[in-house]
Image (spheres, rainbow, N blue to C red):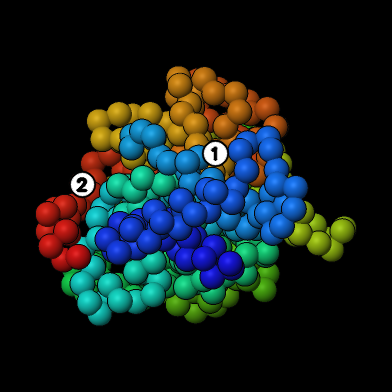
Amino acid sequence: MSLVLRFLGVSLGSPDSSPGGKASLGAATTSLKRLIPDPGKHRQKGLWAKDAVALAHLGPDPAEMQRGDLAVPVGLVNLGSTCYANAVLQTLYAIPPFRQALYAARPPLSQDPVVAQLRELFACMEWGRRDPLDPGPLVAALQLDHAVQQDGQEFMKLFLGLLEARFQAQNPLDALLRHLFRGESGYETRCCRCGRASASSGRREGYYELAVPVSGFQTLPESLTSLLAPETLSGSNSLACEYCGTKTEAERQLRLASTPPLLCISLQRFVFDYRKMDRVKINEALACPLTLDFASILSPDQGAAVAHVNHSMFSSQYPAGSSAWWRFDDTAVSALASGPRASSDHGSALALQAANAKLPPEVAAGSIASCTAYQLLYRREDAVLPSVALSEAAEAW
Ligand SMILES: [Zn+2]
């Protein structure tokens, strides 16, 4: 019997995989129907006497897993403590060039277990008829422990790092993640005595996210201003100035040379508390504007290239042509009818789940305030996201 049940489970998972499977499934279902009592009734004896137990073995009722409207995003099953992965998957799925690139993967890239499972999941999220979907095969390919809650920011970073390494196998996907998420920044260190910038100040490095402090700030621009403000280097941190030939006090400042098309901002909600000698979570609300204006954050000499473009909170135009906002909470997906500003229960921007939606967000005009949001995605308004034609992608598949 268990073999039949297992067979049923597999077949229901991919009903279109083979015509033979369909026929066998029909026969098996008919014979099983005779064994399963009507709703509310149960058999008095035999294997099926404990109908609730038997039905539990059959898994969820397939009739309740039919996706109604393809325009409504699909939920993802939480496998235990994998809600952090679901939030990241929903976010990445909402980025059209990202999922198109996956569809366009060719062998050997498409045979990589992680890439193969991710694109199968995304294809089912886009065109499949089941809701919710089980990310189990992908989670297994990533060797994640279902029972261990991980940090969503950390997972996103590691996941993108892994995919970037795998994407190296295929041009032009090898440059995709860099193109979407990588900006450039550099530290400028200026001697307070001679006023000259150190030789290393011109060096630029890539960044994939800006990690900003939350504690003590009420708005994201305030927090970014603090991140980009000069700090004084003195004492043992003094600068060995190559012009003065001695150790001097200096000012060091982070400068943004560019922002990527999709700017990822991590809110640092965990800080180390030296009194408790432990990490503590900051549950303070931070108001995040729907449009981020760097001109009001950067000083005139600092990052002019960044200041002249607006960055708007990323929305995926999903479904095509609509600008609906959705709240994702594992299998529960709901539309925020009047957008994020009017919602009373959302904890974060698109797809990023609130750790505790019960906390009342303080919502200011043009901003989303949340006590729990930990990651934000902004789109640079002048950036053209690359696109892979669907027909091309389908051919590649
Ligand atoms: Zn100097």
Q: Note whether 173 is above or below 326 in the view shown.
A: below
Task: Tell me if 112 is positioned left or right of 45 in this view.
Answer: left
Write the residue at 63% across / 58% down: 57
Residue 199 placement: quadrant: bottom left
Spatial separation of the CA atoms under disc 2 and disc 1? 32 Å
Badge 1 marks a residue whose secondary structure is strand
Which residue has dot 1 on it?
332
Classed neighbour count for the residue bearing mark 1: other residues with Cα under 10 Å, few (<14), some (14–19), many (≥20):
some
Classed neighbour count for the residue bearing mark 2: other residues with Cα under 10 Å, few (<14), some (14–19), many (≥20):
few
| The furthest residue to the right | 275
Between 120 and 296, the one lying in front of the other is 120
Badge 2 marks a residue whose secondary structure is loop
Task: Tell me if 215 is positioned left or right of 275 in this view.
Answer: left
Q: Earlier in the sequence, mark 2 or mark 1?
A: 1
Between 67 and 151, the one lying in front of the other is 67
Q: Position of residue 89 (x, y in %)?
A: 45, 54
Residue 181 visible (yes or no) = no
Residue 178 placement: quadrant: bottom left
Which residue has dot 2 on it?
384
Instruction: Kindly identify the amino acid type of the residue bearing the numbered disc 1.
Output: Ala
Q: Position of residue 125 (x, y in %)?
A: 37, 49
Write the residue at 33% across / 37% down: 70
Q: Position of residue 210 (x, y in %)?
A: 48, 54
Q: Note whether 78 is above or below 196 in the view shown.
A: above
Q: Quadrant of the N terminus?
A: bottom right
Task: Tell me if 93 is positioned left or right of 383 in this view.
Answer: right
Instruction: Kindly identify the amino acid type of the residue bearing the numbered disc 2.
Output: Val
Q: Position of residue 103 (x, y in %)?
A: 25, 60
